[in-house]
Amino acid sequence: MVFYHNIDPVLFSIGPIKIYWYGLMYVISFVIVYLYVRAAVKNKKLKISLAELDNLMIILTIALIIGARLFEVFLYNPSYYFSNPWDIPAVWKGGLSFHGGLVGLVIAAYFYSKIKKISLLHLADIFVVPLAFAQALGRIGNFINGELYGTITSLPWAFKFKSAEGFRHPSQLYEVFYNLVIFSFLFIKRNKKFPQGTLLAYFLILYSIFRFLTEFVREPEVMIGLLTLGQVLNIFMFLGGAALLCYIKKKA
């Protein structure tokens, strides 16, 4: 048994204005992250005001989108975007790199924590829990768009995507699954007494392992030797998470 992907990426249209499922997933993600962190602020787990949280959410969202788009444009599809520069700002159509978004978030959070004199690692531990769930929603958006599909397979749950030849691994759904696993793990651990940065380190390590393995059944976009660009980035991500965990344990 195989499945045919016939989902319209446009949720609805109002004249020339189109609302995409992909964009909706990001809106829902923003709301979930905001409500989760807002609860942490109200419970005194994060020592900033609600007004400061509002500003922080705007800063992080802008940083995430810019970082994710820059990685997509310059690392994954430079030839396409340089030939079609008007598509660079069209983020609602998809094309946001997770690793670029993560870099953008870290840079923005670093400067924010310095200005507000709060712990970057503590801030990251709070945000990383709902962000893991948000990442799962983002992959649902990729699936609806029919992008980032997997390699050709004859497995019974293979999908026929309109823009791809043959039947493919629904690698987006694999990523939805493992991101929900990571979220569940972090959510269970969130109230444990860990040194600051532990949840962030767990996320970096778990995500990099799952994503590295998934890349084997995901249609490669850019190859670096025998590895995909995603696998190379995940090696650095794993090393960063492992180094952070070692640093935390040594400091403790």
Image (spheres, rainbow, N blue to C red):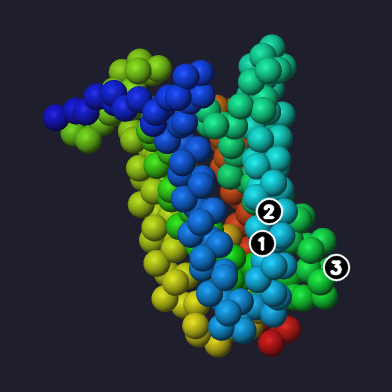
Q: Which mark is residue 54?
A: 1
Q: Nearer the viewer, residue 173 or 244?
A: 173
Image spot of residue 44 (x, y percent): 62, 84
Image spot of residue 89 (x, y percent): 67, 28
Q: At numbered mark 1, what does the secondary structure look like: helix, strand or loop?
A: helix
Q: For the point 84% across and 68% down, which residue is it?
A: 114
The amino acid sitting under disc 2 is Ile
User: Is label 3 or label 2 in front?
Assistant: 2
Q: Which mark is residue 115?
A: 3
Vertical placement of residue 85 versus 249, above or below = above
Q: Nearer the viewer, residue 14 or 123?
A: 14
| In the image: residue 224, left or right of residue 26 | right
CB under 8 Å between callouts 3 and 2? Answer: no
The answer, for residue 205, to whether it is visible in the render is no
CB under 8 Å between callouts 1 and 3? Answer: no
Q: At numbered mark 3, what does the secondary structure look like: helix, strand or loop?
A: helix
Residue extending farthest right:
115
Distance from Cα at disc 1 to Cα at disc 3: 16 Å
Q: Which residue is mark 2?
A: 58
Q: Nearer the viewer, residue 198 or 154?
A: 198
CB under 8 Å between callouts 2 and 1? Answer: yes
Mark 2 packing: few (<14 Cα in 10 Å), some, or many (20+)? few
